[in-house]
Amino acid sequence: MDTLTVELGSRSYPILIGQGLLGDPRSFAESVPASDVLIVSNTTVAPLYLSTLEAALRPRRTLATLLPDGESYKTLDTVARILDVLVANRFGRDCAVVALGGGVVGDMAGFAAAVYQRGVAFVQVPTTLLAQVDSAVGGKTGVNHPGGKNLIGAFHQPAAVVADTATLATLAPRELRAGLAEVVKYGLIRDSVFFAWLEQRAEALLAGEPEALAHVIRRSCQIKAAIVGQDEREHGERALLNFGHTFGHALESATGYGRWLHGEAVGAGMIMAARMSHASGLLPQADLRRLVGLIERLGLPVSIPDVPAAALLEHMRIDKKVLGGRIRLVLLRGIGSAFVTAEYDPILLRHTLEGHPAGIS
């Protein structure tokens, strides 16, 4: 088992990474001191892992609430179902909420924990690659709104993240590919050596090779933990973690939270951000080609068909990074070198959304 720490002073917490952690009581000995625990999962993950987790949490009183599976259910109405269970079973402020599932489950369970009695303990047990490398770490919780992705939420750090890599063996290939998009992001924003490693091991990752996956989980969590430790509430550097997300979130919102997986939208969004970076004279053509080539090898989309540029732009205008009415973007100067800016040519942005930014062959 590997252990990393997200350094946030009194709210620091461990990220545990290894095989078989979900069923090991020691994984939860310190992070779940509560005697009452609500496990939040969904109808896909629960049949696979719920009984194992319940056994690991004994002798605590555990209840489970199962949610429908899918991004389209990431709503306030679904969070209300979690809160109803907490209230009906008289859970006190000393209870804990444990999220068992992917990013959608983690975001909703975390938001419920953040608002129930003004905040109760919360533990992430991510079962998808995307959640293990990204969404389970950092304390962002929330739900979608028809007007935009993750517009309603709160920062609420978990007491621990327990990433059992054995759960990836049951992950659908499409979900695995979606998770790899977030992995690629870390190389692009912070670590060119890691990006080159991904280029060398793309096929091993697609095949689900355990050692390769364990390495990308650890390195991704190291990078995210370091950034979150510096900027917990996204006042500065943490915005780099949104590379590709401003475009990707707009795509998810514009298509109704169902057509694209989050990682797929992020993959296409990273291509758009990189193309705009190149068109702005920032990113070398060779680096753009490397990114497009890797995204293609990972089986992720590199373009956005049939979505009007005007619709994407409208959703981007209510992105959480908009300040003073200006859309801020995360762009690249090179692989491993990202920055946040509101200073760009709006014509290039529109050309990018239309699929033909100036200067791109």
Image (cartoon, rainbow, N blue to C red):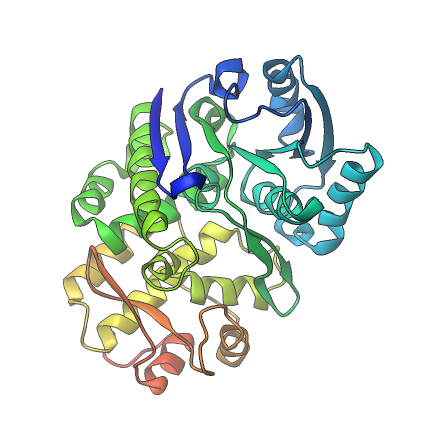
Quadrant occupied by the N terminus: top left
Instruction: Please give left or right for residue 2 compared with residue 30 in the image.
Output: left
Quadrant occupied by the C terminus: bottom left
Spot occupied by residue 204 in the image (x, y as percentages of width and height): 29, 31
101 shown above or below 224: above
The residue at the point 25 percent across, 62 percent down is 338
Instruction: Please give left or right for residue 142 compared with residue 337 in the image.
Output: right
The residue at the point 44 percent across, 57 percent down is 233
Residue 349 vs residue 164, the one in the foreground = 164
The residue at the point 71 percent across, 41 percent down is 68
The residue at the point 35 percent across, 41 percent down is 7
Is residue 299 visible in the rendered structure shown here? no
Q: Quadrant of residue 211?
A: top left
Instruction: Please give left or right for residue 48 compared with residue 21 in the image.
Output: right
186 shown above or below 144: above
Q: Quadrant of residue 64?
A: top right
204 shown above or below 308: above
Residue 201 vs residue 137, the one in the foreground = 137
Q: Residue furthest front?
A: 10
Is residue 358 visible in the rendered structure shown here? yes
